[in-house]
Amino acid sequence: MRKKSSTPNRGFRVADQIQRDLTELIARELKDPRVGMVTVQSVEVTPDYAHAKIYFSVLVGDPKECEIALNQAAGFLRNGLFKRLMTHTVPTLHFHFDQTTERAADLNALIAKAVSSRAQDD
């Protein structure tokens, strides 16, 4: 029989802490010019805390270049997390560009177009 975890939602708390610490590390310590103004949108941690998917958005710059730069700097950022987190293991970081904001803008444009065409028909 599997023992229940004594701390429920620990994975969510670890992911939130990783998100806060990564945001600060990227803004203050990462000096790569390919990484512009990055916002860490969400972090998903595997149950064994071995891997973490970090979803980010970019305000200025090329998202693909930024994704490449962040994945190349993942070791540096992981080392910074190791110094900040009070956990036994620090997950391997995998950065992915979050396209949610772009999709939302596209959907808003489609809705506005549909509303304007309906208004013209009436």
Image (spheres, rainbow, N blue to C red):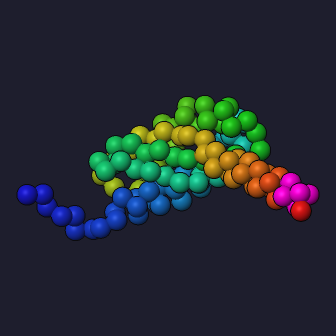
Q: Is residue 76 visible?
A: no
Q: Residue at x 14, y 61 (%)?
A: 3
The furthest residue to the left: 1
Coordinates of residue 17 in the picture (x, y in percent): 46, 60
User: Can you tell which quarter of the image residue 69 is in?
Assistant: top right
Please indicate whether residue 2 sits to the left or right of residue 118 in the image: left
The furthest residue to the right: 120
Q: Residue at x 44, y 51 (%)?
A: 44
Please indicate whether residue 43 sits to the left or right of residue 89 in the image: right
Coordinates of residue 35 in the picture (x, y in percent): 68, 40
Observer-nearest of 25 and 97: 97
Which stretch is magenta? Answer: 116-121
Q: Exactly how many numbered labels are in the figure?
A: 0
Q: Residue at x 54, y 40 (%)?
A: 95
Coordinates of residue 77 in the picture (x, y in percent): 51, 43
Q: Residue at x 76, y 55 (%)?
A: 111
Please indicate whether residue 114 sits to the left or right of residue 88 in the image: right
Type of secondary structure dominating the magenta stretch: helix
Q: Is residue 13 visible?
A: yes
- Residue 40 belongs to the span the image colors magenta: no
User: Can you tell which quarter of the image residue 11 is in?
Assistant: bottom left
Q: Quadrant of the C terminus?
A: bottom right
Coordinates of residue 43 in the picture (x, y in percent): 49, 52
Observer-nearest of 10 and 35: 10
Is 66 placed above or below 111 here? above
Is 84 placed above or below 79 here? below
The furthest residue to the front: 122
Q: Quadrant of the N terminus?
A: bottom left
- Residue 120 belongs to the span the image colors magenta: yes
